[in-house]
Amino acid sequence: MATYIVNVYKREVHVSANITSKCNIEKMRDNHHVDTDVDDWSVGYNPFKRCPYCYIETNIAQEA
C-alpha cells in the first residue's frame, strides 16, 4: 500500500495509514487517484489540500 493517496479530481491528499470511512476512498474513480510513496502533493507549488480526516499530525505529516 502506498503512503499517500492523491485525489486529483478534488485536489486532496490522504495518508493511507490513517484512512477513515469519511475519506470515501472506495468512491474514488480509478482515474481520479494516484497512489504514491514519495510525492505528498500537499506542499510546493500549487499544493493540494490535506484531508481533514486522515492527514493528521503523524510522523509522515510532520516530515512534509
Image: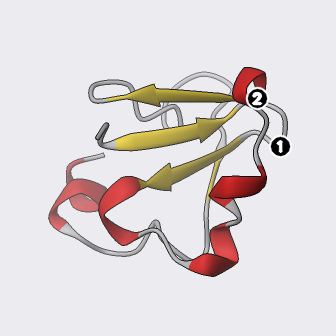
The chosen color scheme is: secondary structure
Task: Tell me where residue 15 appears, x and y as whole percent.
Answer: 40, 56
Task: Tell me where residue 13 appears, x and y as whole percent.
Answer: 57, 47
Give the numbered dot on residue 10.
1
Give the numbered dot on residue 40.
none
> Label 1 is placed on what type of residue?
Lys
Q: Residues within 10 Å of mark 1 (few under 14, many from 20)?
A: few
Q: Toward the viewer: 26 or 52?
A: 26
Q: In this rendering, is residue 16 above or below 35?
A: below
Q: Gap in Å between the C-alphas at discs 1 and 2?
A: 8 Å
Q: Quadrant of residue 38?
A: top left
Q: Residues within 10 Å of mark 2 (few under 14, many from 20)?
A: few
Q: In this rendering, is residue 8 above or below 64?
A: above
User: Which residue is the site of mark 2?
Assistant: 32
Task: Tell me where residue 26 appears, x and y as whole percent.
Answer: 67, 55
Horizontal arrangement in the rendering, residue 33 relative to residue 27 (left or right)? left
Horizontal arrangement in the rendering, residue 9 relative to residue 45 (left or right)? right
> Label 2 is placed on what type of residue?
His
Horizontal arrangement in the rendering, residue 56 relative to residue 37 (left or right)? right
Q: Give the secondary structure at mark 1.
A: loop
Q: Quadrant of the N terminus?
A: top left
Q: Toward the viewer: 59 or 27?
A: 27
Task: State the residue at coordinates (75%, 39%).
Answer: 11
Q: Do labels 1 and 2 touch, CB within 8 Å?
A: yes
Q: Give the secondary structure at mark 2.
A: helix
